Amino acid sequence: MRAAIITFPGSNRDGDVARALRHAGAETVAVWHAEDSLPPGTDLAVLPGGFSYGDYLRCGAIAARSPAMDAVRAHAASGGLVLGICNGFQMLCEAGLLPGVLMRNAQLRFVCRRQHLRVERNDTAFTSAYAKGQVIDVCVAHGEGNYIADPDTLSRLEDDGRVAFRYCDAGGELTPEANCNGSLNAIAGIWSPGFNVLGMMPHPENLIDPLVGGTDGAGLFDSLCRAKADAA
Amino acid sequence: MSADTVTITEELVQEHGLKPDEYARFKELIGREPTLTELGIVSAMWNEHCSYKSSRKHLRGLPTSAPWVIQGPGENAGVIDIGDGLACVFKMESHNHPSFIEPYQGAATGVGGILRDVFTMGARPIAALNALRFGSPDHPRTRHLVSGVVHGIGGYGNSFGVPTVGGSVGFHSRYDGNILVNAMAVGLAKTDEIFYAKATGVGNPIVYLGSKTGRDGIHGATMASASFDESADEKRPTVQVGDPFAEKLLLEACLELMASGAVIAIQDMGAAGLTSSSVEMGAKGNLGIELDLDAVPCREEGMTAYEMMLSESQERMLMVLEPGMEEEAQAIFRKWELDFAVIGKTTDTLRFVVKHQGRVEADLPIKELGDEAPIYDRPHEPTPPRPEIAAEDIRPPLRDSEALIALLNTPDLCAKNWIFEQYDHLILGNTVQTPGGDAAIVRVEDGPKGLALTTDVTPRYCEADPVEGGRQAVAEAYRNICAVGGRPLAITDNLNFGNPERPHFMGQLVGCIRGIGEACAALDFPVVSGNVSLYNETNEIGILPTPTIGGVGLIDDCARHATIGFRRDDDVILIIGETRGWLGASAYLAEICGREDGAPPPVDLERERAHGGFVRAAIAAGRLDCVHDISDGGLAVALAEMAMAGNMGASIDTLPDGPSHAVLFGEDQGRYLIALPEDAAQALIADAQTAGIFVMKLGRTGGDALILPDNQAISIEALKQAHESWLPEYMAAEPA
């Protein structure tokens, strides 16, 4: 698994996701946002968390128009895997690679806390190491993670089974208290129609170590490395 | 406002915060009338904030060295050796005055400033902490200030990408007119790649880096060196505006530039901006500095030399570069889309020369601007000792269980989740202990080492007895680090006091420094960096004396650390350290009895050291993993916190001798609560007895309630309800 991690001015979880991928056995390459192509042999393009361009204008809006995003778009169009976490999810929505938008959290405050997620399906390149319906304990850290889409888009996402993760409580129930930002249908992450592009607000990359909160995030990166191995 | 059209009047001198004798001294030094720019420069260099003129005499007495100290006070931050070729770089600094006037930007730029101090030395920041003090919750402004300050700290730190891992928050009416925002940053560097502010070499280029210079923050340092009155709001234009995005770029660009070998000296532009940074670089290196302001990147047109020299625009750096490496350096800064300009050179004249539009706007002796700043030995009165209060003289107004619930629901002792959930405390993936423990633990890179970090002070003790309060602040930091298994290495101190021109407040400063010094010496816990914030006074009401201590300790193996929550059913709960039931100046006395009198609990530094060493050794040996220090609210509050954190109750059947309310809520120092399985407990008791350390069995863990003697049971749910409800309810309520 060869992962290209795009660093934008203001990215700050690029190192965290690189560490998680290496931990799972992937090779990582840092790509500067001004590059207009991905390194040869890239399997996975990663848009990391952070505050690209200071979140000025709108979160992810400026990054979505950078040269490297054209390369990511081309990679996705040819079926390549793309993972956008937090600010990366916001970029994917701004770039039109995923539908909907991430608004300010309903409580109007930044939220950093441990968060349970329900894994909605495990027959994808991103989630095969989890069980369907499994509840995982990861974390969130964002001010604009409130997923909103128009009713048609939302029902298409639901009908196509493209919701990847939902905010839930420890028992897997979708309660208002467990929904940390007010997202519609408790959506924490969604796929593109081809299931090769995943955008998610939570941070699995910070939960890969028993000493630092647990290992429930590692499954995502293990799944990706396994997907590459299976494809080979 | 050109230099040669302005006559320097007495009024103008006063507006610049210079006393008549200081101005006379300055005129004598330069042998003529100064220009307006020169007056601005000297006012910036000789104010309290930059010159430490009231405190310097007393700060000299603090212990600042130890075999592991690489750099003590006097640089941008302190540096200690943590082994494996790594150094920990850290400092705490206040941003009190600006945060009261404009809480979001004041707090945000406080965080920005301290992060810059750390990465200026070549260290990548790995953790941030803070210590906040607000006025009474009933004060109409408090809610707005809490909201703005917390939002500002989060807004800056989250975007910059450093985990905010700990801190302390307190409320008291004495902070109604002057809140405290003390921000601490901790970074990692290689021991042989530390960068300093001292310029070397004549004729080397001086380079300006980072954001452009605007008109914000002019006279910020002077504002921070004066008391407030009703017109404090009018000072809003002196508050700087932060841009964490620019700071993140500056961090990456600086570290990349440092790695290239081009940097001789570096200094961030903090208080008094371009003036202070260039004077300090020259004075430290025994060199002159010549600046050409025409080259300074400006945000606005028509800025005068005076404005440029006093601007406190954020996210700017000054460097002395190796000659011939300008182009390489410039390429790095262009990549990060930051400004880069050669604005001057080092000289051998020992003069600080500032040119603008072909005119010399300032020509001053550089050493005297810093080194010969006035130093005062201000009159100081010791705080009269308060009588001790005997436990028997305090009639408990509530049953102990009711008092416990009430204490957990107070502003000072309640859960602070509402605050720390707004700080990204998990980024970088090394936060082993998140906020809410005794000390935060941040793993060093991939481990196994970790740093234990804490900020502590008990202002009501300092008010009651400055010397004892100063000792206690250091001792509590020491204890909190030991409680998680860390070896305390060094501290940074942030001394927040009232008006030093009043002998009573000056006496508090002198007393606290004395106490801090005694504790640092006894505990081998030297001061390596610090900051002094005086004039925290509004309409002649000064704050409680608040010498915040930021402590750093080292854990050899992060896998062996302790946390506060009960872990196992049927563990034996032990108390280490003697309990006399000291209620003077306690949280119980203030919150339950409505009295803020009495002498504070004395600190026995020898015992502090022995108990801390004992606990730390047991944790490092893998014999102990559940520890909590006993501080505000005493034994009962500590037990409740352990139960809530572990979601497990406890049954307490024996207490030390004395009236139960005094034993449960007294704040005797040097104590820890621990919980461990029966066999391990027996072994530890035997070891403690051999070491001459007092230890006593109190009860056992288990169940879903904390059961105090006399069958006073409180469910964990009720404890949590009391503990967790106050702050969110307060913040959600409409202002009165």
Image (tube, helix red, strand yellow):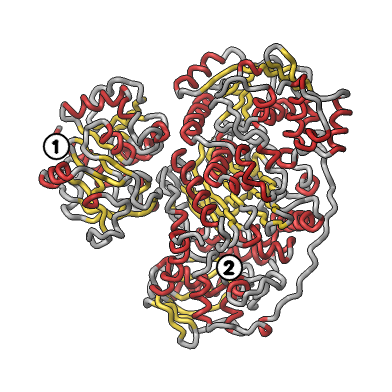
Residue under pointer 2: B632
Residue at the image position 32 percent from the left and 37 percent from the top: A22
Residue at the image position 73 percent from the left and 61 percent from the top: B466
| Picture quadrant of residue A134 | bottom left
Residue under pointer 1: A193
Examine the rendered structure and indicate whether residue B45 appears above or below residue B341. below
Which quarter of the rendering shows the C terminus of chain A?
top left
Examine the rendered structure and indicate whether residue B82 appears above or below residue B16. below
Tell me the tag on residue B157.
Answer: none
Q: A210 and A132: which one is in front?
A: A132
Q: Amino acid at mark 1?
A: Pro
Which quarter of the rendering shows the N terminus of chain A?
top left
Position of B162 with respect to B44 (left or right) is left
Are both tags, 1 and 2, on one chain? no
* Residue neighbourhood size for the residue with mark 1, other residues' Cα within 10 Å, grouped as few (<14), some (14–19), many (≥20): some
Q: Secondary structure at mark 2?
A: loop
Q: B683 and B542: which one is in front?
A: B542
Residue at the image position 75 percent from the left and 34 percent from the top: B43
| Picture quadrant of residue A5 | top left
Examine the rendered structure and indicate whether residue B72 appears above or below residue B617. above
Residue at the image position 51 percent from the left and 49 percent from the top: B148
Is residue B248 in view from this perspective? yes
Q: Amino acid at mark 2?
A: Asp
Is residue B288 in view from this perspective? no
